[in-house]
Amino acid sequence: MLLSEQALKKIDREVSKYPAEQKQSAVMAALAIAQDEKGWLSQEVMEEVANVLGMPPIAVQEVATFYNMYNLKPMGQYKISVCTNLPCALRDGEKAGHHLKQKLGIDYRETTADGVFTLLEGECMGACGDAPVLLVNNKRMCIQMSEAKLDALVDELKAEANAGGAK
């Protein structure tokens, strides 16, 4: 098995929230658990999730490829998704993305040479009034990101990475 016993227990906990004949309803949670453990969703990991949930592997892959929170290839330790949809773009979202590109020395869909950062364009994050908005590793939302706040965030994440921080 590719997933740890701990990850499988977490998936079982999610499955228990649904009627027994609807185990597949836990697919999004199961993919998130697998991704948290592995860092990304390889074909083999998606197949294991499919086996655990009693689903065809293609059905799991359809979910993983539809939603942008799932990583289908290795990412940096910190995945930064910058909202570039129109409301954020009009409120300096594009400027925030450009600043991060310059600071990190990468473009969107690229990872820094040290493997610490991957930069992505993100879809609407539902916080248009707080633009520019970005997400770190799909879990931490950062709002009203001025250049100073972006610099502080990058410095914080670099320090955390150097200290052996989050995956």
Image (cartoon, rainbow, N blue to C red):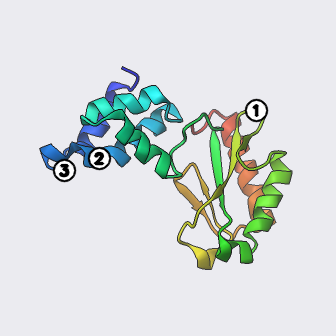
- The reply to whether residue 7 is in sight is no
Q: Nearer the viewer, mark 3 or mark 1?
A: 3
Which residue is rendered at x = 43% and y = 29% of the image? 45
- 72 up-or-down from 97: above or below: above
Left or right: residue 44 versus residue 122 is: left
Find residue 138 and report its horizontal and vertical position in percent: 53, 52
Location of the C terminus by quadrant is top right
Left or right: residue 25 versus residue 69 is: left
Location of the N terminus by quadrant is top left
Give the spatial CA distance, label 1 vs label 2.
Answer: 34 Å
In the structure shown, which secondary structural element does the residue marked by tag 2 occupy?
Answer: helix
Give the spatial CA distance, label 3 vs label 1.
Answer: 42 Å
Left or right: residue 167 versus residue 33 is: right
The residue carrying mark 1 is 114
Left or right: residue 91 versus residue 68 is: right
Q: How many marks?
A: 3
Disc on res. 18: 3
In the structure shown, which secondary structural element does the residue marked by tag 3 occupy?
Answer: loop
Q: Nearer the viewer, mark 1 or mark 2?
A: 2
In the structure shown, which secondary structural element does the residue marked by tag 1 occupy?
Answer: loop
Q: Answer yes or no: do the residues labelled 1 and 2 have beta carbons within 8 Å?
A: no
Disc on res. 20: none
Q: Answer yes or no: do the residues labelled 3 and 2 have beta carbons within 8 Å?
A: yes
Find residue 42 and report its horizontal and vertical position in percent: 50, 30
- 131 up-or-down from 119: above or below: below
Q: Quadrant of residue 30?
A: top left
Disc on res. 26: 2
Q: Give the residue type that dot 2 points to.
A: Ala
**CA neighbours of label 3 inside 10 A, class few (<14), some (14 to 19), many (20+):** few
- 1 up-or-down from 41: above or below: above
Q: Give the residue type that dot 1 points to.
A: Asp
**CA neighbours of label 2 inside 10 A, class few (<14), some (14 to 19), many (20+):** some
